[in-house]
Amino acid sequence: MKTWDIFCQVIDNFGDIGVCWRLSTDLAAHGMQVRLWVDDPSALAWMAPQGCPGVEVRHWTQPLDLAGLGASDVWVEAFGCEIAPEFIAARAEDTCVNGTKPLWINLEYLSAESYVERCHTLPSRVAQGPAAGRQKWFFYPGFSDKTGGLLREADLAQRQADFGGNAWLQDLWPRLQHGFGAPQAAADEQLVSLFCYEPPALQGLLEQLASTPRPTRLLVTAGRATRAVQALLSDKKWLQRTFHLRGQLSISYLPTLTQRDFDHLLWAADWNLVRGEDSLVRAIWAGKPFVWQIYPQDDAAHHAKLEAFLDMAQAPDSLRQFHRVWNGLQDGPLPTPDQPAWQRWALALRGRLLLQADLATQLLGFQPKNR
């Protein structure tokens, strides 16, 4: 049994720890022993309260508590963080059973941009410190067979096939807070999940959903999405002007969800609005129409990243326009969702990406010649 040390720093929004936890549990499902070092493990109390056999969460303190720590076979520094120097100093002379040094991987962020294929599995020599001369290796998740693939558990398809959406929603219903519209579910209402930052077109989305022929329930995730929606609804003048004589939209606020229940939310909804990296991948595997809010960057670098994703995904024109308005790349009203076309697109995208080997499998099979 191999041991992996994965290092993660929580920057904001819990996306980093979300990906690292999924990776850790997936590696454990393959028989690995994982030590997940994280500077702020508090989110795991609601994200993964059940824990996982084979995964040990260790608090990344300064300095690290290394008492009694055994050697490991793989070191992973996730998303630009650097492994704690005292760990490197203590473990620099470790060797694996086969006489090689532990494999040192720099796991990068997910992107569809062209540089990912060029940089995937490139080496980087450590210039100084106790590990000077060692190689670390860049490993890029991605959307093509020239990248490291996407996180996908071996049992995911079976869990989704066994999922009962109506029963799950009935169990969830008492935990919802109903903030606008009807507190009771209508038989024919569509379900739209909202997991977002503060998108420029949020007001336009609410207006659009309030005007649709079919009743809609917006299921708003806890945290920033709830705060953004409630801030809009606190504007009484806008509310009266916009929703006068319109009764098609109901808004319900979700509690914090475990990672399993977040998957269930995406499976139960008719379409999903997601954000960041982890939820994008989960929305792809859900096979439902989705719109992605990419993490906004001050230098607008996210514009190119979004366009690269839309190109890779072969998004239809109406979905491209929706993404651009939703992410603030262009002004104007949100286009009306073409749900049949978007559904065909979502299934086709999922089908293509299912042909790739998943991220954990590729990491487990990665054997660079020079270590």
Image: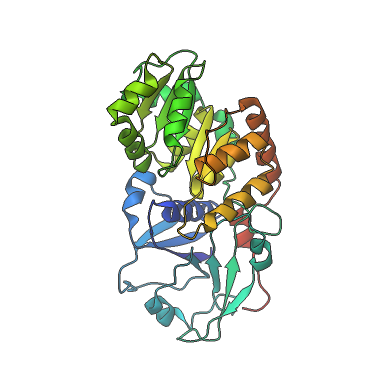
Q: Where 30 sits versus 233, above or below?
A: below
- Horizontal and vertical percent position of residue 121: 64, 68
Is residue 353 found left or right of 234 in the rendered image? right
Compare residues 361 and 2 and report the one nearer the observer: 361
**Residue that appears at 56% across and 41% down:** 323
Q: Quadrant of the C terminus?
A: bottom right
Near-viewer residue (258 or 97): 258
Q: Residue 363, position in %: x, y?
A: 60, 61
The residue that appears at 41% across and 44% down in the rendered structure is 197
Q: Is residue 254 above or below residue 98?
A: above
Quadrant of the rendered image containing residue 154:
top right
Q: Residue 131 appears at what percent x and percent y?
A: 49, 83
Which residue is rendered at x = 40% and y = 41% of the image?
258
Q: Tell me, yes or no, if residue 282 can be seen here.
A: no
Q: How is the image coloured?
A: rainbow
Q: Position of residue 192 (x, y in %)?
A: 48, 28
- The residue lying at 53 percent from left, 65 percent from top is 2
Residue 70 lies, with reference to residue 363, above or below; the image says below
